[in-house]
Image (cartoon, rainbow, N blue to C red):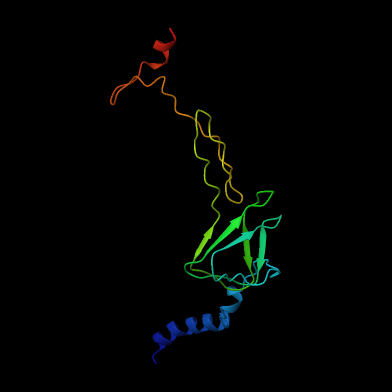
Amino acid sequence: MNWSCLRKVIPVLLAILTAGPMDPAPAAQFSSGSTGSLGALAPASNTTVVLPADGILHYTTVTIPAGVTVTFQRNAANTPVTLLAQGDVSIAGTISVKGDDAVPYSGDNPSPPSLGGPGGFAGGQGGTKSTSNNNGAAGQGGRGWRSRHL
């Protein structure tokens, strides 16, 4: 090996020796804060999970297979879902935080709001369509506010 090649190799070797062993394991460790008190979440079929008062679910592992839906039911405080696991989490299925469907419109009264999913807004009160001011045609405007009230 000639001197110019050695001058290039020595700094690289020193850098490697100074850095020490590069163990990726310490960087990969993570704690979610889960106590694991609920055990493993591994449903074989569709299931509904009732949220605790604080909305935090402490599992050891979470495995939701393909074709399985886990639905989270809102609690009285309407907290968002916080799903914690101490170990592996594998979700091939569906997690649903869907709210209730809207109430069908009936008569002249507005529809009441439906409940949102956990942590979600309950929605607003539905309105009704008024037909009294529909004198315009496609591509045309109606009379407008001023002409109706003068």
Position of 137 relative to 120 (above/below): above
Position of 34 relative to 54 (above/below): below
Picture quadrant where residue 114 is located: top right
Location of residue 69 in the rendering, given as x and y in whole percent from the top left corner: 52, 63
Residue closest to the far left: 139
Q: Is residue 58 left or right of residue 150?
A: right
Position of 2 relative to 22 (above/below): below
Position of 61 relative to 55 (above/below): below
Location of residue 122 in the rendering, given as x and y in whole percent from the top left corner: 59, 42
Question: Along the line of sight, which residue is nearer the eye, 110 or 57?
Answer: 110
Residue at x-position 50% and y-position 28%? 108
Picture quadrant where residue 124 is located: top right
Residue at x-position 65% and y-position 58%? 50
Q: Is residue 137 left or right of residue 13?
A: left
Residue at x-position 49% and y-position 36%? 105
User: Can you say which quadrant of the picture contains the C terminus?
Assistant: top left
Question: Along the line of sight, which residue is nearer the eye, 97 or 16?
Answer: 97
So how many labels did they put on this image? 0
Question: Along the line of sight, which residue is nearer the eye, 17 or 110?
Answer: 110
User: Can you say which quadrant of the picture contains the N terminus?
Assistant: bottom left
Picture quadrant where residue 55 is located: bottom right
Residue closest to the far bottom: 1
Residue closest to the far front: 107
Location of residue 40 in the rendering, given as x and y in whole percent from the top left corner: 63, 72
Location of residue 93 in the rendering, given as x and y in whole percent from the top left corner: 49, 66
